[in-house]
Amino acid sequence: MTDHYDALEVRNPAERERDLLAALPRQILQAKTATTAFATILDGVEPTAVTSREALASLSVTRKSELLALQQQRRASDPFGGFSALRFGPRMRRVFASPGTLYEPEGEAADYWRTARALHAAGFRPGELAHNSFSYHMTPAGSIMECGAHALGCTVFAGGTGQTEQQLDAIAELRPAGYIGTPSFLKILIEKAAEKKVAIGSMTKALVSGEAFPPSLRDWIAERGVTGMQCYATADLGLIAYETAAREGLVLDEGVLVEIVRPGTGDPVPEGEVGEVVVTTLNPDYPLIRFGTGDLSALLPGRCPTGRTNARIRGWLGRADQTTKVRGMFVHPGQVAEVVRRFPEAGRARLVVEGEMANDRMTLRIECAAVPEGLAERVAEAIRDVTKLRGAVEFVAPGSLPNDGKVIEDARSYQ
């Protein structure tokens, strides 16, 4: 199959869903029995009962900030805070650090981070040289991509970050087929090559990540002979989704189960609605269950025109953590969700904070088809109860709030 990495990409969607849900109880059992952190988080959960997306959605979401806090609390006895099923030794090849500092293990499995699939979709093939400009220092980005390139059958030049002119010399002399790294550094390399009149024409494709890749930059790079594709990966989960030649969203990876939930909650949102990306990985070495990435995206309808049958997401649409300080107190998206949850008549909601510094005003705008008498007063009372702050209530027509994943909008003037 020349156009697809393997048969998993084109299997029947019902077969994929069956396989993912069949693997789910095993992964939950692994998390409970092999990690002390999830033994606590999943206490009382019977793995054999979690065989549907509805059952999965009933489990708590563990967000990155919480994972970091738990790691820090337990670091004296376990540097991974009880989240890793591996211990130091031959099965754990490397340890990396993310900002915070959050430590992540790398296991011994080939293509541990599962990026070969994204590299293949970006045009990389066995026998080629890939120039990898992701960092090899402390953070896992360089290794994330190198593992996938090796699994694909590519040789890798470990460029790392910085040293632009030395990297240009290596590209000119080694003539790699493609680039791996951030889109901004690729732009720097192209500009510097033009300035120094260094030939880098061998490099005709790129897999970029770690930053936004807007169409304007994609087109600018393409005009200079490089076709760039993007992928969405994190240091905790590895590959989550990747772009294809169709350029219609990012196709979900085969090794993760992805949900889009309302920010501040664990409640899945309908297809097309923007929410937080929550991922359950099938990696037994680092078995994260309902891991909240803090990133916003939305599921796209239909299937990829390239024939890949997995679901697609729109890509990175911002951050889900919208915690805002109002009159000296923090208001969280979860509190907004708690208010709305008390009223079955309420649909989507958005808390708008307006005013000038030291003169904050909160208005909770709620989509509602029919407004019973007294509902505004009861919602206002719930706002006070949950947030300890007063707020106005405004009802709007269903579908009128922006579909951008925002639960709290800070519209204050700071001038």
Image (tube, rainbow, N blue to C red):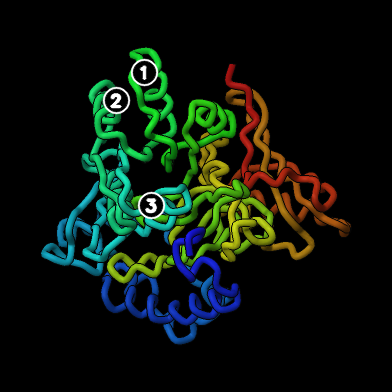
The residue positioned 81% from the left and 56% from the top of the image is 375
Q: Residue furthest left?
A: 89
Asked whether residue 42 appears in the rendered view, the answer is yes
- Neighbour class for label 2 at 10 Å: few (<14), some, many (≥20)? many
What amino acid is found at the position of numbered circle 3 in the picture?
Arg
**Which residue is tagged 3?**
125
Mark before the other along the chain sequence, 2 or 3: 3
Rendered position, 228 above or below 114: above
The residue positioned 64% from the left and 51% from the top of the image is 274
Mark before the other along the chain sequence, 3 or 1: 3
The residue positioned 43% from the left and 81% from the top of the image is 25
Q: Which picture quadrant has residue 151?
A: bottom left
Rendered position, 249 above or below 356: below
Q: CA distance from mark 3 to mark 1?
A: 27 Å
In terms of secondary structure, where does tag 2 sit? helix
Label 2–label 3 contact, CB within 8 A: no
For residue 168, which numbered disc appears in the image?
2
**Which residue is tagged 1?**
192
